[in-house]
Amino acid sequence: MYDIILKKRLGHELSRDEIKFFVDGFTLGAIPDYQMSALLMAICFNSMTDKETVELTYAMADSGDKLDLVKHGIYACDKHSTGGVGDKTSLIVAPIVASCGVKIAKMSGRGLGHTGGTIDKLESIRGYKTELDVSEFLSIVEDVGVSIIGQTGNMAPADKKIYALRDVTATVDSIPLIASSVMSKKIAAGAKTIVLDVKAGSGAFMQDTESARVLAQKMVSIGKGCQRNVAALVTDMDVPLGKCVGNSLEVIEAIAVLRGEEKGELSELCIELSSLMLSLSLGIDRDAARERALTAVSDGSAFNKFVEWIKAQGGNEGWAYNTDLFPKAKYHAEVLSLSDGWIKRMNTQEIGRASLTLGAGRRTKDDDIDFAAGLVVEKKTGDRVKRGDLLATLYSNDFESLAVAKEIYLNSVEFSKESVERPRLIYDIVI
Ligand code: URA
């Protein structure tokens, strides 16, 4: 291990055997944290070649169980977002695509820190089971066409251990480490087609669009190297996505989009992601795929598929028909603008932190979540506001947290006296 660390520190390319050696050794506990940390830091400084990144992805994907969906006769599509604030697209895209005849088999994560996680959002629907065994998961994918569960126990365990170490050694934001981490899990989960939503901006890992584009290109090329159909969109996370941030609030917003009641950026992005998934899976052009996705929303088939899916996983489907049934937070507070002008910038990571403070997220992985907590954004970058206008409404079952979150929210918004353009929603597509 000493020689491998030194080689990387000197900027040389590691071989397949060397990469396999440290991944397997660390997973088995034979390589101590301090040596792995040193290697991760050397990778952060000296990066990895494409060849090394692919080998690292394979080694991590091979470190535990792998699901071979194709062997089960399932040509499924998977979708992954690199994470952000208010990103509830999986809840919308999965039933749209499934209602158009493409199977969705997806394993998702929980939220940690300022970003939310699909599994927590789904658990805010009473009864929804996120822990199914593989045979139940596959039979729902077969029968209903869509299933989303939590990552099963022993999939890509190397990534789990390495990620935990990166989290506490300031080695998360390295493009080869992120690309291999995401793709090792996607490859182990077995879908033939993978669509990635790589976020850029103040609420994302990648703060600028250029790094997000490089990350997207790396992940697409890793996926192709593993014989998957893969493409990525590079999209904005400089403002929260949609209006709602927080678990049940986001599910309610997703349902409104599926019922065609909520238009705007969230719905536009979901249609773009769905089109890409459908066009790659069915081999049709993106315009035709777009038409199918739009029709699935307008004729109600996407919403009906959502209901069918939630019911199949034990969730109370009545909540989809009547979202007033979701438990509400006991307290709420309004955040009013203290300035006149245009919103120039929103620090989206801080908005995520406000939601976390209200109880919607976890500071450590064992924290409990308040499903009803979160916030609804009323004004966004580019909007004109007058002093006293409502910027956001905060919800929580913890009264004390409202004042703290309000302060965080107000500090996260910058104003300008000049008009400001709204950031673009989609920056690029990598195919
Ligand atoms: N998400 C992952 O799964 N891994 C990373 O390294 C970063 C984000």
Image (cartoon, grey):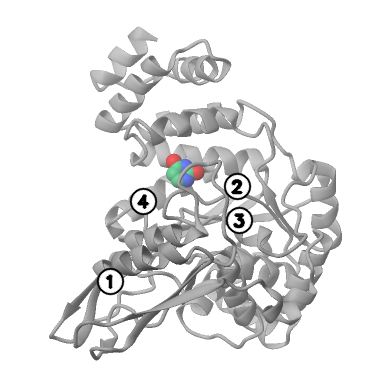
Label 3 CB sits under 8 Å from any ligand 1 atom: no
**Of labels 4 and 2, the one closer to you:** 4
Label 1 CB sits under 8 Å from any ligand 1 atom: no
**Of labels 4 and 3, the one closer to you:** 3
**Of labels 3 and 2, the one closer to you:** 3
At label 4, the amino acid type is: Phe
- Residue wearing tag 4: 205
At label 1, the amino acid type is: Leu
- Mark 3 element type: helix
Label 4 CB sits under 8 Å from any ligand 1 atom: yes
Residue 84 in which image quadrant:
bottom left
Q: Earlier in the sequence, mark 1 or mark 4?
A: 4
- Residue wearing tag 3: 120
C-alpha distance separating marks 3 and 2: 28 Å
Judging depth in this view, the residue of 65 and 419 nearest the camera is 419
Q: Which of marks 1 and 3 is nearer the N terminus?
A: 3
- Mark 1 element type: helix
Residue placed at 55% from the left, 53% from the top? 230
- Residue wearing tag 1: 410
Rendering coords of residue 164 (x, y %): 47, 32
Q: Is residue 58 visible?
A: no
